[in-house]
Amino acid sequence: MKKIALPFVLVSFFYLSSISQQIKTPAPSPPQYVKQDFGLSSIELSYSRPGVKGRKIFGDLVPYGKVWRTGANSATTLTFGDDVIIGGTKIPAGKYGLLTIPGESDWTIIITKQLDVTNPAAYKQDQDVVRLTTQSNQLPFPLESFTILFANVTGSSCDLQLIWDKTFVSFPIKTEIDSKIMAQIDNTMNKDNRPYFNAAMYYMDNGKDLNKALEWFNKATDADPTAYFVFYQKAKCLAKMGKKQDAIAVAQKSMQLSKDAKNDDYVALNEKLIASLK
């Protein structure tokens, strides 16, 4: 019997091992990877999403006053495609760890050089890139899965929001793009194929020289006299300059071109613009 028992145990072990290797089940805290276009590049986020599952979360499962990996399983990371500013500190492009210290009324946000912190014992404060404190807010409803998302995204800023159970925490991320775009404009305007329309739009939307923006809009419409969308933006530029009658005239031209192109959206936009100027 002893001679039979050992081979039987070994065969059973390898059989069960082979069966288990063929079974795939959902991860209890599934990972999520988010890529958000931001500024002139992007931000990539990697984290895992535990669920509430009837548990008390903050102050219990996630203790107050201790470093948290800000998710489950592996470390949470952020990869910045360009330099960003968090908490007034400029952070060079690259990959960083995101850690937090939850509190009852506020949280400490930590951007660290460490990419492998999964428990408080592994955390080294001398690897911090920036620390900031942000308010913790209570939601009127619970969220089952831990969620990190990018919100209020503009050309040069966004908010990174952390939400779980009834707790909501947010902090801003900024990037400096104006000098880079201005350099691009200066460079491209010295070439044959000049992006007059894009340059004019940037000037108009970012509080720069409207006379220069109008000059470029004029060159853009000269290059394409049927571009109804360019005429529409030119009319908006004139309106910003206080030249209402000129703006109305250009908007009327844009509206006619929009009708010829069968673009009802721009017909409606021009109608609204004209109405606002009368």
Image: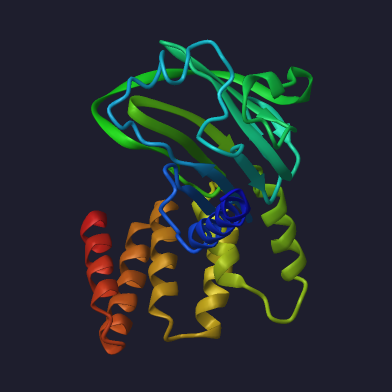
- Name which quarter of the figure residue 105 lies in: top left
- In this picture, is 216 found above or below 241? below
Is residue 199 rendered to the left or right of residue 129? Answer: left
Is residue 221 rendered to the left or right of residue 191? Answer: left
The x, y position of residue 87, in whole percent, is 62, 25
The x, y position of residue 219, in whole percent, is 57, 76
The x, y position of residue 138, in whole percent, is 31, 20
Is residue 12 rendered to the left or right of residue 258? Answer: right
- In this picture, is 117 found above or below 136? below
In depth, the one of 79 and 263 nearer the eye is: 79
Look at 77% across and 65% down and name the residue there.
Answer: 187
The x, y position of residue 237, in whole percent, is 44, 59
The answer to whether residue 211 shows anywhere in this view is no
Count of numbered tags: 0
The answer to whether residue 12 shows anywhere in this view is yes
Is residue 135 rendered to the left or right of residue 175? Answer: left
- In this picture, is 141 found above or below 12? above
In depth, the one of 22 and 71 nearer the eye is: 22
- Name which quarter of the figure residue 250 lies in: bottom left
Q: Furthest residue to the front?
A: 1
Look at 58% across and 68% down and name the residue there.
Answer: 216
Q: Quadrant of the C terminus?
A: bottom left
In depth, the one of 158 and 216 nearer the eye is: 158
Look at 56% across and 63% down and name the residue there.
Answer: 200
Q: How is the image coloured?
A: rainbow
Look at 55% across and 84% down and name the residue there.
Answer: 223
In depth, the one of 219 and 70 nearer the eye is: 70
